[in-house]
Amino acid sequence: MVWEPDSSVGWIDVDRDEARRVREMLGMLTAPEAVDPHGILPILIALSDRLFPGVTTQHTRAKYVLFCGWHLQRIAATGGSASLSARLRHDELELMRSLLDSDDHRGLFGRRSRENIRTTPISVYWSTLDRWGLIPNGFRLDDLSALAPGVSSGHAAQLSDDARLMAESKAVGILPSDFPPSSAGFPGADQELGLTREQADYLVDRVAATCGGTALHAALTDERLRHGRRPWSVDETIGGQAMTDARCFSELIHPARLAYTKLLIDDARSAEGLELGDMETQLNDSFAAWRDETDSRLDQLREWAGEPLDRLLADPEIRLEPRRRRFVRSAIDRVVADPDGCLDDPELHRLVRGIEGALKKNKARLGGGEPFRRWMKQPTMLASNRLDYRWGRVRGFADDIAEAS
C-alpha cells in the first residue's frame, strides 16, 4: 500500500540526504509495526541504506524508476504555460489511468485513491534516480524548469552547477544518453508495470555501476536470494559488514521489541482485567522461534555485542542521540546476559518503558494514558516484527527483474 497522508510536512534549508531521511521516516509510519517506541529508526534507516541504496519503504515496482525518468524527459523537452507541478501531475495521472486499464495492478500508485492520489511516484522515486546516478548529482525538481524550452534567464541563474552544464550542452534530456526509450504512447495508452528484458538489464547495470558490492546488487543478480525470508537467509556473506551489522542488530534487539507488546498485554490485564490470550500465545511463539533461530549463533552475537555494536552506535552517519544509544546498549546487554529469560526480565521491561516515556511523553502507550486506551479498543501486536531492512521492497524489485520478458 502507498502512503497517502492527510497532511504534509515541509522543511527549509535541509540538505538532500537529510530530506530523504525525513521522507523515509514518514513513509515508515504506514504500518502499525513502524511505531518505533524504542527509538531505533535512525539505525534501521542507516543500515537499510547501506544494504539497499536507493530503495525505500514507499517503493512498489521497479518500472516506476523508468516511468519517472520518462516524465522528466517529457518536461525537459516540452514547454508550455502550465506550471512544472501541473504538467507532472497531468502526466502522472495519465499514466495511472493507463496502468489501471492493464491486467497487472500490483504496486500501482493510485489503485485505490485514483484521481485523489496525493503521494505520486516521482516524489517517492526521486532519491532512487539520484542514488543510481540517473540524474545529475544534487539535481532538484525545480531545476527541470530551466531545462525546458522558454526558460527565463532569472531561473537559469539559479540552476545547480551540474544542471547548468547539462542545459549549456543542449542535452536532449537530463538522463544518461543510454537511458531506455519510453514506451510507445507514454504516458497514455498501453502502459505496463512489467519490464522488458532490456529495461531490466539496464536497471541492473545502473545498480552495478553505482551500488556495486552492496546487498542490493547481489539481490538483483543472484536468482536464489529473492526467495529468502530475510536478506541473510540464503547467503549471509552478501553486503559485507553492513549485512553482519544488520543481522546481528535485528536478532539482538528483537526481544526488546517483543517486550513492548508483552508490557501492553500486562497493562491490559492489570488495569482493565482484560485477557489477551491469543496475542500472548502469538508473542510467546515468536520469542520461541527467535530463540531457536539464534541458539547456534550465540557466540557470534555475544562477540558482535561488544566493540562492533559500540562502533555502530557511535557512527556519525546515524547520529543517534545519547539516550537512544544508552537504551540500545543496555537492552542488548540484557538479552546477551540471559537469552532464555530476557523476555521476562524486569530490567529490560524498565528500559522499554523508560525509552518510550522519554521519547513519546504523553503519547506513550505504556503508562495507562489516552494512547493506551485507544490501543485497548483494538489490541494488536506493535513493534514486534523482525527487522528486515526493506527486504520486502527489494524482493519486489528482484521479482520484476527476474520476471522481465
Image (spheres, rainbow, N blue to C red):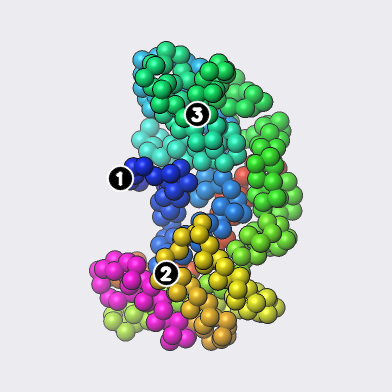
Name the residue: 45% across, 77% down. Answer: 259
Whether tag 2 and tag 3 are in contact, CB under 8 A, the answer is no
Q: Secondary structure at mark 1?
A: loop
Q: Earlier in the sequence, mark 2 or mark 3?
A: 3
Q: Nearer the viewer, mark 3 or mark 1?
A: 3
Which residue type carries mark 3?
Asp
Q: Nearer the viewer, mark 2 or mark 1?
A: 2
Alpha-carbon span between mark 3 and mark 1: 33 Å
Quadrant location of the C terminus in the rendered image: top right
Q: Is residue 185 visible?
A: no
Dot 3 corresponds to which residue? Answer: 161
Dot 2 corresponds to which residue? Answer: 322
Dot 1 corresponds to which residue? Answer: 7
Hey, which quadrant is residue 190 in on the image?
Answer: top right
Q: Earlier in the sequence, mark 3 or mark 1?
A: 1
Please name whichever residue, 228 or 279, is drawn nearer the observer in this view of the structure: 228
Name the residue: 43% across, 85% down. Answer: 347
Bounds of the magenta segment = 344-370
Which residue type carries mark 1?
Ser
Q: Is residue 253 left or right of residue 5?
A: right
Name the residue: 57% across, 41% down. Answer: 131
